[in-house]
Amino acid sequence: MGRKEDNIARALAVMDDNLRIRNIGIAAHIDHGKTTLSDNLIAGAGMMSEELAGKQLLLDYDEQEQARGITINAAVASMVHTFDGKDYLINLIDTPGHVDFGGDVTRAMRAVDGVVIVVDSVEGVMPQTETVIKQALRERVHPVLFINKVDRLINELKLNADEMQKRFVKIITDVNKLIAKHAPEHLRKIWQVNVQEGKVAFGSAYNNWAISAHAMVLNKVSFKDIVEYVRDGKQKELAHKTQLHKVILDMVITHLPDPKKAQSYRIQQIWKGDIDSQIGKSMTECDRKGPVSMMITKIIIDPHAGEIAVGRIFSGTLKKGTELYLSGTGGSKFKVQVLAFMVGPDRIQIEQVSAGNIAALVGLKSAIAGATVSGINDVDPFEPMTHYTDPVVTLAIEAKHTADLPKLIDVLRNVSKADPSIQVEINQETGEHLISGMGELHLEVTLYRVKNDYKVEVQTSDPIVVYRETVDHTGGPFEGKSPNKHNRFYFKVEPLNEEVINMIKENQLPQGSKFKDKKALIELLQKVGFTREEARGLESVNGTNVMLDLTKGIQYLDETMELLIEAFDEVCNRGPLANERVYGVKMSLMDAKLHEDSIHRGPAQVIPAGRNSIYGAMCQAMRVLMEPIQKVYVNVPVDLMGSVTNEIQQRRGIVEEMNQDEEEMMIIARVPVSGMFGFASAIRGATGGKVLWSSENYGYQRAPIEIQKEIVAKIRERKGLKAEPYDEAYYAGL
């Protein structure tokens, strides 16, 4: 039996003991060394060749990942590590660091209980580091820290042991500040990382060595020894003395929780059902004998096996042939055909897998990432995963050959299943297919998959920016009449305050119109500026918009409310200015006149009346276009600073901060997404390639009034809408 086969046999032996399982993620800013670290951990555990570790990039098995040298998909690998004479099963997920693939990080964090935050010792804590820490802590995932590329401090920056330690203290302090800021209150102190307790490791993933407080004592290696080994070019010897995989995996087993411990505090955060119910207790206790409960965190489309659903089992035991229900499919049953655990691109088939594990299964036809799977019908679904940003760039895409059109529709469906951060819209009126993603790179990679993996030749438009619309002040009540003139609705609209918008983004105010604990919501809304009457009138939430019913004693309104919510949803999805999604608007129904006969107040009457009433009120409140912006971080030598600021200003960017660190200058700017197209090549050209830069999506801001009219006209023309009278008087008066 080879070493890999032996490891698989040992993994199967440990799978049922959830105290000896660790589900961990590796997360960091782009290029800080996550995949190299993951590879070396897998190699150390005997799942691949040690010679190729860090170079083969086993978890970057996608052709695009290999070509671009970045991680695009969150990849799963299971391995066995021996600690204190016992075998432990470690399910590891390597996540992307590029801002465009942040959705994959969010989904991975739902599956794991602990995370190794990787920070480059030279670059320190970067913007995406903060984002991944925030994502982990929101999901109640316990962090530890690995400071990577320590050899660069010695070879490139020529630091001695004392200077290195000062730099480490700064990184650890920065990470702890982020944990204190984003962790739940009762965990802030406990989850702080510190060297003495062994929650921080230092090393070089590429050269396969690491140390921690525990390893220093065990292997008799000090910081001074490290400096000498690296200066003398003896990193191979150092790697034999203090092995990376042993140090990191020992830290993981010692300090990160097993599934049983983690689920005791995580379930309340990620599942809002009745904790005292049979399934609630079973999940809290991670009971393998309870009913099956699993959350799908990833869909892989395999040309041979079809759709493979990967997810975390929170309760029960899955076997081949088990019948499962999928939330939201109206009680349809699905049978598990194949069950496997993953090592990068390989799937190792198994007969059964129990609570606390991450597994892959074939047979869930309609599953999407985020779906709840259970052995019980109608179980409360897991909380939806909150993504940090919405798609900000769109492409129109069409099949080159008409015969490929039906295939393209199927392919786009599969693409959006595998990556829920991609939004696909088929416009029946114009016949175009629109795909929206987190940035240029996200769409480029998706298009590559459509052309190469699915073999569909397509033509695309230039990238189009996704805008939002909002209102400037209060408008209405505005009368909306139904086509038969028998029903009238009077809506008032006004901007929603930032505190409520943040509540929605934090998922404290859930989407939709079904609220479990309305009483608690009413109290919460009163704290953020709603009157008691407004809070009690909350009917529905869509995106960052709310609909309230402030009417009193109107007959038949209860029967009509569902249709009014549909009208509200239509408005939220297509605003009155440019058919873009609406952002941050409070829409209140103030009065209604309804026909007594229900036949005269059907969908064809109520929905247009409600929609027109809201549209009219929004026009009175002055419609405003909002454009997406990115925060851009540029590291450049001081003498080239002028070229960078010039490049940013040409793109309507605003420089917010400039920080000098010796010969380097860090420029932080806010730039509209519409100005970011082609930025990568332009900035390299302007600086002769002597630049490091990264960006993160930073929400929306009002488009400057002088260009708003022109942008709206272009959007309306593109969508086949009529040009319309604009709010000229309002803008003339500004």
Image: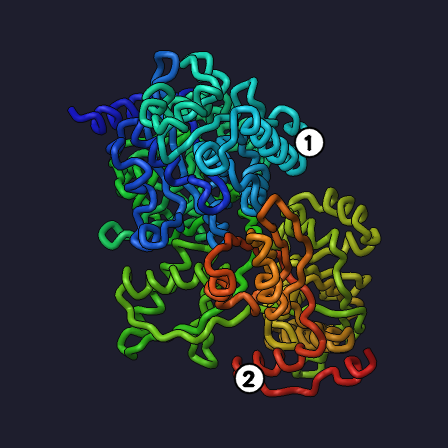
Q: Nearer the viewer, residue 182 or 475?
A: 182
Where is residue 661? Give x, y as percent: 61, 44
Where is residue 409? Give x, y as percent: 36, 68
- Classify mark 2: helix, strand or loop: helix
Q: Is residue 555 above or below residue 360?
A: below
Is residue 675 among the parts visible in the rendering?
yes
Whole-angstrom CA distance, mark 2 to mark 1, is 50 Å
Which residue is drawn at the image coordinates 62% and 54% (left, top)? 667
Dot 2 or dot 1, earlier in sequence: 1
Amino acid carrying label 1: it is Glu
Locate residue 330 relative to residue 13 in the image: left or right.
Answer: right
Is residue 567 among the parts visible in the rendering?
no
Where is residue 537? Give x, y as percent: 76, 56
Residue 717's disc is: 2
- Classify mark 1: helix, strand or loop: helix
Which residue is drawn at the image coordinates 27% and 28% (left, top)? 46
Give the residue pinned by disc 1.
185
Locate residue 414 relative to residue 702 in the image: left or right.
Answer: left
Where is residue 276? Give x, y as percent: 58, 29
